[in-house]
Amino acid sequence: MKSIEIHYFLRRFMRKKYQHSLAFIFAVDEINKNQQLLPNVTLGFRIYDNFFHRSVNYDITLSLLSEQKQGFPNFRCGSQYKMSAVVGGLSSEASIQIATILGLYKTPQISYGSGHPVLRDKTQFPFFYRMVPDEASKYEGIVTLLRYFRWTWVGLIVSDDDSGEDFVQTLQTTFRRNGICVAFMEKVPRVFIQVNESGHHISSTQDILAALTSTNANVIIVYGGTNSMHSLKLVLNAYGPLAKTFPEKVWITTGQWDLTTSISVNDWYIKHFHGSLSIATHKNDVPGFSTFLQTFNPYKHRNYMFLQQFWGAAFKCFMIPNPYGTIKNPTKCTGEEKLESLPGTEFSLHISGESYSIYNTVYALAHALHSLYSYRQMMAERPKEGFQKIQPWELHPFLRKVHFNNSAWDEIFLNENMELSIGYDIVNWIISPNKSFTQVKVGMMNSQASIDQKFIIKSDAIIWPRKFHQMLPQSICTERCHPGYYRKTQEGKLSCCYDCFQCPEGTFSNETDAYQCKKCPEDEDPNKNQDCCIPKAITFLDYDEPLGISLITAALAFSLLTALVLGTFMSYQNTPIVRANNRDLTYLLLISLLLCFLCSFFFIGRPSRMTCLLRQTAFGNIFSLALSCVLAKTITVVLAFMATSPGNNMRKWLGKRLSYYIILFCSIIQLAICVIWLSTAPPFPDLDMFSQAGQIIIECNEGSSTMFYLVLGYMGIQASVSLTVAFLARKLPDSFNEAKFITFSMLVFCSVWVSFVPAYLSSKGKYMVAVEIFSIFSSSAGLLGCIFAPKMYIILLRPEVNTKDHLFKKRGKMK
């Protein structure tokens, strides 16, 4: 039977911490009873305490490396026990001191609570292992927790040492990247620092109290070891009652701070930690541990004076004789006292995070020893050689590869940095009115887990401080900017202190504390509050709306009027006034005017590909036909009077063929322009999302604005020529001289279309279409009224004038 010792460093100060040593003893006993893990091997152990003195760490470490614990390393005389590894210490400072010496001898050291980043440096500490997660993952978890609850204005209270300084520097760098600001930062002095002449200790505690009572930050992050956190509790307990309105905060604790230790639960300060959160080392219930504590008998471990002292102090008895008579009426401890009878604030039967880490550490060493012995047996010729004396450095390859499931079914293994690959628990502290404590696990964080498992929290299960009435606390520098506003940092202040401004017109913000406003998609516009986008209304000149109905009514009315005029002229086609003005040209002009009125239907309704192709081309060609008829009539009138002059040869140009040639020639030019237009850049349906706010205009894109204005320009040339010729012939002697009527009609036509261009360009959406329809109606009605109204007056109201005798009589008088 081989005996191998594991040495464990204990930090003595509070009774609850004695659970660490009991967890260590429990794990060793459990392994020694397991014949599958280390058969024929017995684990031994020694437990040491440094009594909060740095120098003691060196003394103990040197004694471990010496014969008979004399503190003289490298001497090989006397009996020697077999040390395989060292477990400890709890604080980073102690771990660094121990590792500095043990590293020289390549002795494995496994810490169950040290998190200082410098211990990750394997150049300095190549043989140091940690049964706790990486400290950086704790920082990441804190930031994730703050971001989850949208806490951007927090206070920091840290220990006044190197680890506290590193914590502040690292956390502030991470805070800046995530938009979190530090409202204040205070350092807690060590509990055993003497008050110097300048009163440094007193001023530090007063600064802490002043910061807590004056800040508007509702979240306070606390980081430090047992010493500094005990000092903070003393500060709050001593100075807190002086503040009449000491505010409740949400405390986020890290490190080895246990709210229930070192200060009596009857003290004033403790109620203010109700609802606090703690980033604690992950733990699970270990089967059999509570039973072990309930049945623990200190007489089985007489070699450990600290256990006897703890037992005597806890149960007010003594386990060793009282030679000096310092105890009055002493009562001898029976060993049958029950730990479960102690208050939970002094000793808990539930395993703590550090105790759980110690339990895993001992098992990790046992599994590494098992792997080492298995390897030796496989490589040795005789199996018994596997149990020969081992050297501590031989454990390293097997410790690095240790991988097992503990009795709580947690997977235990070390990552490439020789740290435990497990996360932290988020614990909610609940303090009842009778000062009893309850720890409720409300979440967990693990930076090495999958994305959906990195951060898990049950926010509904959290009990918040009573001040917040169980609503989510807010911790911000200024009031949040609501949706529809954006934040702008105040000059000379931290980024978390800002002003809120409403989003500029045409933009929106749909989140709280937006850094800038955004533009909506093209088919959407901001709503009235500018906190979301709403679809734009689709608009076009519809048949159902009042404007569309009015234009349709006008189109039908003008069409019927034109048809009535045409019917009247056809009924009186043999009368002098109809025949004298080129009857066929009159019919063609009236038909073209009728089509002009009807072509407005192409402009009303939802634009389609077909209507867009026909809209402007039909309008241009029909109007060109009408103007060609007017020009032909004007030229015919001029030639007719010129032919009546003696010796004039113009008579041969008179007749229908000249009129048809004029009409055909003028119409073909417009038709050619439209064919080129449709061939090169035809009109097409398009969406105009920007002309009018909140509306998507369905319109016909002209394809080529040049061709569109070329069509209008050609019509303008035709109208100008007709106006010029008619104006010159307006005083020709004739009973029914059309030239003066054509002159008036062309003046109306030109006035309408000259006004159309600026009106068209200044209009938007359906009103642009309405302007063009109105111009069509106005110009067509002008032609119809000016040319045909006088004739209809004579035909219908003055039939006596509509005779051949009257016509020739008038002409004779004019001559």
Image (cartoon, rainbow, N blue to C red):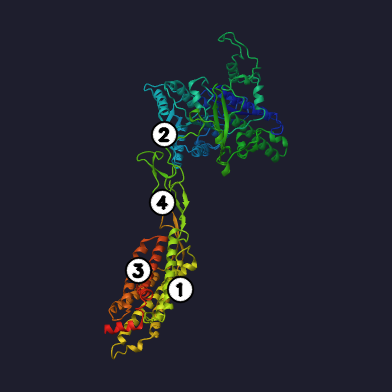
Q: How many other residues sit within 10 Å of disc 1, few (<14), some (14-19) or many (≥20)?
A: few
Type of the residue with mark 3: Trp
- Residue at point 43%, 53% (across, down): 694
Identify the mark at residue 111; answer none if there is no mark.
none
In the rendered image, the vertical position of residue 316 relative to residue 731, given as above or below:
above
Q: Which residue is mark 1?
A: 679
C-alpha separation, residue under disc 3 versus residue under disc 1: 26 Å
- Residue at point 47%, 28% (across, down): 248
Type of the residue with mark 2: Ala
C-alpha separation, residue under disc 4 versus residue under disc 2: 36 Å
Q: Which residue is mark 2?
A: 183
Residue 685 visible in the displayed image: yes
C-alpha separation, residue under disc 4 versus residue under disc 3: 36 Å
**Viewed as shown, does residue 417 lie left or right of 172?**
right
- Name the N-terminal-most of marks 4 and 3: 4
Tell me the element at label 2: strand
- Name the N-terminal-most of marks 3 and 2: 2
Of circles 1 and 2, the one toward us is 1
Residues at discs 3 and 2 in contact (Cβ within 8 Å): no
Of circles 3 and 2, the one toward us is 3
Tell me the element at label 4: loop
C-alpha separation, residue under disc 1 versus residue under disc 2: 71 Å
- Name the N-terminal-most of marks 1 and 2: 2
Q: How many other residues sit within 10 Å of disc 4, few (<14), some (14-19) or many (≥20)?
A: some
- Number of numbered tags placed on the structure image: 4
Tell me the element at label 1: helix
- Name the N-terminal-most of marks 3 and 1: 1
Q: Which residue is mark 4?
A: 506
Of circles 4 and 2, the one toward us is 4
- Residue at point 38%, 86% (across, down): 655
